[in-house]
Image: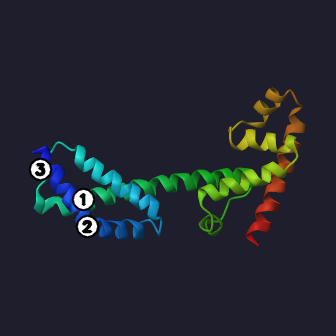
């Protein structure tokens, strides 16, 4: 039975691969590589499935499984976006508008933040990184660096100010 399932699935894959790729790419707004990964995951899941697969239900099963996988990817991206929105809001001290995030992917935002932190004074960048990335409060940073609380607070204020200016320049 499993041999029959794998033969049926392989034949369906060969026959409908282009159609599935187009569908997944469209659902992922042009991200072909992730679409290919989602299709691969879908067929892998079907191949390791122990339940019998019928030829007349395979089409619906493939599309349902693929759609669910694409939904998982979309949900994951939304969580990443929310995380980066929170990180940027913390870094800049202001909420970030959706249009700013719409023009940048999560990786691009990370890269922009890292690029700016690389050009900051080391003490400012370190405090900002500890506050944003490590999610440490000022009191903990102060204790860890053995530095006055107000000094850390001022460094964080300056770093956020620089980050806000940098983001404004980028979005102008």
Which of the pair 67/161 is nearer the observer? 67
Q: Are marks 2 and 1 in contact (CB under 8 Å)?
A: yes
Is 160 displayed left or right of 25 in the figure?
right
Q: Are marks 1 and 3 in contact (CB under 8 Å)?
A: no
User: Is residue 148 among what the camera can see?
Assistant: yes
> Which residue has dot 2 on it?
16
Is 115 displayed left or right of 24 in the figure?
right
Mark 1 or mark 3, which has the lower sequence index? 3
Which is closer to the viewer, label 2 or label 1?
Answer: 2
> Which residue has dot 1 on it?
62
Is 133 displayed left or right of 59 in the figure?
right
Instruction: Give how far across and how far down residue 74 sits, in percent.
Output: 44, 58
Residue 121: mark in rendering: none
User: Dot 3: what SS?
Assistant: helix
Instruction: Give how far across and how far down residue 107 sits, in percent.
Output: 61, 55
Query: Is the residue 24 above or below the residue 40 in the image?
Result: below
Instruction: Give how far across and how far down residue 28 sits, in percent.
Output: 44, 65
What separation in Å lies between label 1 and label 3 (alpha carbons)? 16 Å
Name, please, the residue furthest toward the bottom: 172
Q: Are marks 3 and 2 in contact (CB under 8 Å)?
A: no
Residue 4: mark in rendering: 3
Query: Is the residue 51 above or below the residue 149 in the image?
Result: below
């Amino acid at each position: 039975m499993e041999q029959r399932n794998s033969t049926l699935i392989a034949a369906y894959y060969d026959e409908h691969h282009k159609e599935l790729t187009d569908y997944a790419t469209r659902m992922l707004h042009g991200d072909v590589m992730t679409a290919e990964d989602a299709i691969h995951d879908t067929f892998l899941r079907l191949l390791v499935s122990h339940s019998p697969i019928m030829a007349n239900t395979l089409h619906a099963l493939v599309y349902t499984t693929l759609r669910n996988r694409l939904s998982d990817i979309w949900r994951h991206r939304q969580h990443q976006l929310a995380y980066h929105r929170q990180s940027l809001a913390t870094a800049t001290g202001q909420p970030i508008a959706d249009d700013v995030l719409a023009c940048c992917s999560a990786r691009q935002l990370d890269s922009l933040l890292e690029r700016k932190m690389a050009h900051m004074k080391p003490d400012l960048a370190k405090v900002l990184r500890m506050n944003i990335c490590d999610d440490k409060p000022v009191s903990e940073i102060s204790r860890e660096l053995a530095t006055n609380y107000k000094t850390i607070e001022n460094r964080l204020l300056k770093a956020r100010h620089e980050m806000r200016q940098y983001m404004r320049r980028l979005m102008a």
